[in-house]
Image (cartoon, rainbow, N blue to C red):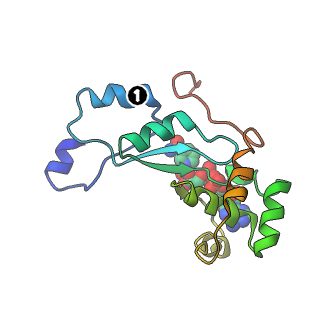
């Protein structure tokens, strides 16, 4: 991948599901630090350790399954905040992700939802609301560990 950067074929290198020990191992020989580490991150699992590690190494944290694959969209605490702003629960969860400093990567096959998921810049969550959403650990699924997952 580094050769491809040097050859001008790609601009940046990204990794996914890397925990801190995976990045440590990579950085022993890497000449180019990955630009991004894509991880399962949403209010239900915030992976604080690797997020802090990414930040310390100037690696962007990209949050995949930011809506918890849809399972976070009826959580009462999120519904309450969404109603306050006249936004959808998806928009609230995506805004939380952005304000936490992540790059959320939602997926939808529904054109109206794809548009909705980009309309995040006419409201801001308060610090108290961010903290309330931070408390939702475990409300949906948790990440699976890449070292032990049964493929
Ligand atoms: N690197 C990795 O290991 C990894 C692992 C998993 C996923 N990913 C990537 O992460 C991306 C997203 O993850 P994901 O698909 O697992 O989960 P997600 O984006 O959290 O959730 C997708 C689900 O939410 C629904 N949805 C999207 N926007 C919505 C909205 N505004 N209102 C209501 N429902 C909405 C979608 O329905 P509809 O599509 O029916 O609209 C779909 O059922 C994908 O591109 C995927 O490739 C990466």
22 shown above or below 121: above
- Which image quadrant for residue 18? top left
Observer-nearest of 22 and 70? 22
Tell me if 3 is positioned left or right of 117 in this view: left
Image spot of residue 99 (x, y percent)? 57, 59
Label 1 CA crowd tier, 10 Å (few <14, some 14–19, many 20+): few
Label 1, ligand 1: CB separation under 8 Å: no
Q: Quarter for ligand 1?
A: bottom right
Does residue 69 lie above or below 139 as drawn?
below
Classify the position of the N terminus by image quarter. top left
Residue 96 relative to residue 22: left or right: right
Q: Residue at x 51, y 55 (%)?
A: 101
Q: What quarter of the picture does the C terminus occupy?
A: top right
Image point (52%, 43%), residue name: 39
- Residue 143 as seen in the image, left or right of residue 7: right
Q: Residue at x 75, y 38 (%)?
A: 138
Outermost residue toward the top in this view: 148
Q: Identify the residue position indicated by label 1 in the image.
A: 22
How many numbered circles does the render carry? 1
Q: Is residue 102 above or below residue 85?
A: above
Instruction: Give the x, y percent position of residue 147.
Output: 51, 23
Task: Return the x and y of residue 103 as percentages of the image width and height.
Answer: 50, 57
Residue placed farthest to the left in the image? 7
Would residue 71 appear left or right of 24 to someone viewing this image? Answer: right
The residue under the point 82% across, 70% down is 83
Q: Secondary structure at mark 1?
A: helix
């Amino acid at each position: 991948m580094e050769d491809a950067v040097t050859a001008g074929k790609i601009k940046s290198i990204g990794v996914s599901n890397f925990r801190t020990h995976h990045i440590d191992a990579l950085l022993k020989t890497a000449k180019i630090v990955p630009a991004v580490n894509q991880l399962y991150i949403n209010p239900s699992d915030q992976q604080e350790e690797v997020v802090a590690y990414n930040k310390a190494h100037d690696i962007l944290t990209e949050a995949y399954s930011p809506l918890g694959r849809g399972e976070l969209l009826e959580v009462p605490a999120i519904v309450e905040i969404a109603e306050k702003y006249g936004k959808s629960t998806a928009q609230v969860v995506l805004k939380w992700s952005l304000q936490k400093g992540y790059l959320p990567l939602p997926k939808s096959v529904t054109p109206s939802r794809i548009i909705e998921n980009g309309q995040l810049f006419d409201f801001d969550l308060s610090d108290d609301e961010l903290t309330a959403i931070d408390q939702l650990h475990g409300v949906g699924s948790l990440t699976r560990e890449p070292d032990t997952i049964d493929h």
